[in-house]
Amino acid sequence: MLKKHRGFILWNCYKRAGDDGLKNTTDIEQDRQYMKMALELAQKGMGFTAPNPMVGAVIVKNGRIIGQGYHRKYGGLHAEREALAVCTEEPEGASIYVTLEPCCHYGKQPPCVNAILEAGIRRVIIGSSDPNPLVAGKGIRILKDHGIEVTENILKEECDKLNEAFFYYIQNKKPYVVMKYAMTMDGKIAAYTGESKWVTGEAARIHVQKQRLKYTGIMVGVGTVLADDPMLTCRLENSRNPVRIICDSHLRTPLTSKIVRTAKTIPTILASSSKDQQKIKNYEEMGCQVLYVPEKNGHIDLNRLMELLGAARIDSILLEGGGSLNWSALESGIVQKVQTYIAPKLFGGEEAKTPVEGKGFPDPVSAVLLKNSEIIRLGDDFLIESEVKRNVYGNC
């Protein structure tokens, strides 16, 4: 029996030897349904696999699911090998559904194509091709050269979306940046007094915590630290904290701030153009990493910062900056996605802060354009999630 859960169709129970599998469906429908199961498995690795992708795998033999697995954490078994390791019967002659093209190179784990060949798998069904130059079609070619039937692009759009951060990072060597803000229906992120707790309700705030788990880093400007003294942690159970990145051109972050006082236990980077060695030493003694970034137009060069963070294997960033940093990020072209949480409230006030400040663009033609917008209801609030209109998957 199939049921709906989190937007995916799931199999109601784990199919074991003797079960009849998916009945009364066409081959393509079966492929899609098994791939949906693999996608649901892949999502379980969210927040723990970076800079590797999230991947899920389902092994089917004679209409029965005999194994399933997912990439649980960076350095651990890949999805295909985990699924093969828990098979309830010999996988020879079976089909494997995998959300991403199997790897064919040695890294933390040996190549998954080797495991598939050794297991005697008959057919491989793939969601996304892997843009990693070490793979990039080579895994598929190896499988075909060994006589294995390969079906590609099953639920490709969903599989691509699952790993949009990985795809961007592996091709550009820079983090995938998501600009997030919460605002009222009249476009205010705080009241004219500066009070902003809380713009949105609990459901939206829980969703934000999931984003802090999903993305490797979280970035704010020093103004946010001075105004709010935030922790910038993930408050979900059994989660992990993002790497905290503070854009602080002149090292104004207080040594007494929560971020600095917890830097020995939570990775913290101060991106700065300051060369004041005493200041730098003070922060380093507190556990912070001070990353020198040259200035551009009076602020740190955000494009250079992205290059440095990418080299440090930070593949994705949740940008929770104020209006000034958001404008600088948009102006410098580092933003790939925008998440706008909207509360059904009106704050008013010509002095009240807005999500994007700075100079702004001179006319509508010059504006940042968004595409593929999706609206999600979160309690009484709404989330509008949009991609910045430029090449994301290499096919625009």
Image (tube, rainbow, N blue to C red):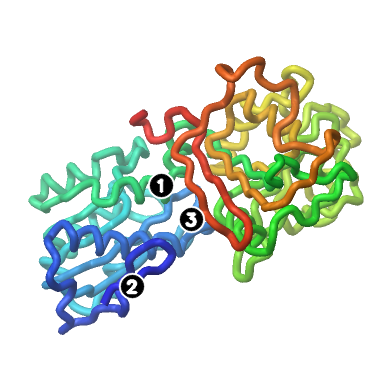
Q: Hey, which quadrant is residue 226 in on the image? A: top right
Residue drawn at (16%, 57%) of the image:
28
64 is higher (above) or lower (below) than 346: below
Residue drawn at (87%, 32%) of the image:
277
Choose mark 1 or mark 2, whichever is in front: 2
Choose mark 2 or mark 3, whichever is in front: 2
Q: Hey, which quadrant is residue 99 in on the image? A: bottom left
Q: Which residue is mark 1?
A: 161
User: Could you tell me if the residues under marks 1 and 2 are in contact, i.e. CB atoms within 8 Å?
Assistant: no
| Residue type marked 2 | Lys
Quote the CA–CA distance across marks 3 and 1. 16 Å
| Residue type marked 1 | Lys
Quarter containing the C terminus: top left
Q: Decide if residue 286 is in sight here.
A: no
Label 1 packing within 10 angstroms: few (<14), some (14-19), many (20+): few
Q: Decide if residue 344 is in sight here.
A: yes
Q: Which residue is mark 2?
A: 3
82 is higher (above) or lower (below) than 48: below
Considering only order in the chain, which callout, 3 or 2, is on the residue closer to the N terminus? 2
Q: Position of residue 107 (x, y in %)?
A: 40, 49
Marker disc for residue 10: none
Q: Which residue is mark 3?
A: 49
Residue drawn at (71%, 41%) of the image:
186
Q: Secondary structure at mark 3?
A: loop
